[in-house]
Amino acid sequence: MKKSLLLIMLISTVTFASYAQKSAKTQSTDSATESKNASKTSAQSQSDISTLCKDIPFDFMNTTKNPMGAVVNFVYETTNHLTATDSKTYKKVALVYLPHNYDENDTQTRYNVLYLMHGGSNTPGWYFGGANSSTRITQLLDALIATGQMEPTIVCAVTYYNDYCKNDTANCTNFYKELISDVIPALESKYHTYAKSTDTEGLAESRYHRAFGGFSMGSVTTWSVFEHCLNEFAYFMPISGDSWSLGNTAGGRIPQLTADYLQKKVLEAGKSPAEFFIYSGCGAHDIAKPNLHPQITAMQKLSDTFIYSDDFSKGNLYEAIYQKGGHDVLTVSAVMYNGLPQFFRKK
């Protein structure tokens, strides 16, 4: 386990560098006015909203008392969704966490599904290590399920990397196409989920049993999925990354415009505040905080769409800031510990 944790923390350092490089490159081209406005918004917001993020209790993820789920490889086929001129089929591999006692022969029991996206320069192994592995994240899932804080849930760690495009931003902001067309139909027809079918109607009917989350560039992906897939997903967990729909690091540079844009997408999808939920978060010492925090604060002001509360029976938006965290797995696990018990409550 120590080796797995050290490997994940090492990879987190690579992710930090990747996100920081993209963030710094974009912010260096910002106008002085944009920078001042973002700083002013961030400073004013510090006392405006609660951002409590509780520590994971000592011994909570004790592997000797919590039944362990299983991690398996999941292979699916996809196509190049960035152009119509490429007709090739590509194979990709995801990692799937199956909760303890998942039985492929039990067709009566149905499971919620959480999709997770890694950060820059990483793979699905950032979360789960590999097939038959145990990591900090799998142990957290085991514990949340064992203690009844989360229903048994299938968790699929995917990747935005592919064999046809080397542009991370393009891959992240367009991954929703592969997700809806290829990943979900393959996964949710193989495993016992709540989707009676994987067509448009079937995914819409089962959206309260489906979530998407991600870290760093995976958080950028999550905001894109929120923007485009509100008819298929009800729960979202963007960690340590803002929406780049209006440009790289737009959540920090132009937070109110970004919030207005996201509100517009909600209204276009015809969703009320009771029909979607966003549990976001970052570390207090996180490179992504200057981008995510202003965006969440701006979204909070649009209270007819985004209702800020850490209790999703009362609201649909929250930002947990982990005081001990940076741009790392400790922040991710803390946000997941606090946020996942809020998911899949609405049936």
Image: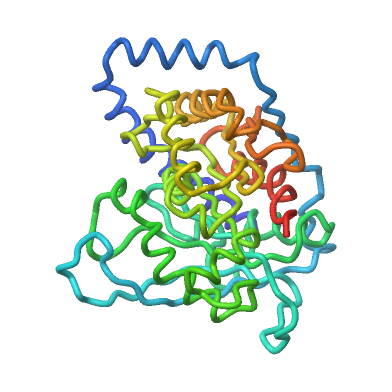
59 sits left or right of 118 in the view: right
Q: How many marks?
A: 0
Where on the picture, by quarter, is residue 325? top right
Residue at 47%, 52% (x, y): give it: 118
Q: Is residue 17 above or below residue 198?
A: above
Image spot of residue 189 (x, y percent): 54, 80
Q: Quadrant of the N terminus?
A: bottom right
Residue at 32%, 35% (x, y): give it: 22
Which residue occupies the foreground of this view, 343 or 138? 343
| Image coloring type | rainbow
Q: Quadrant of the C terminus?
A: bottom right
Residue 195 visible in rendering:
yes
Image spot of residue 305 (x, y percent): 58, 34
Which residue occupies the foreground of this view, 171 or 206? 206
Q: Is residue 49 above or below residue 168?
A: above
Q: Is residue 316 above or below residue 144?
A: above
Where on the picture, by quarter, is residue 313? top right
Residue at 63%, 55% (x, y): give it: 137
162 sits left or right of 117 in the view: left
Residue at 68%, 70% (x, y): give it: 111
Image spot of residue 265 (x, y percent): 44, 42
Which residue occupies the foreground of this view, 9 or 96? 96
Image spot of residue 121 (x, y percent): 37, 50
Residue 11 visible in rendering:
no
Residue at the left extreme of this rendering = 85
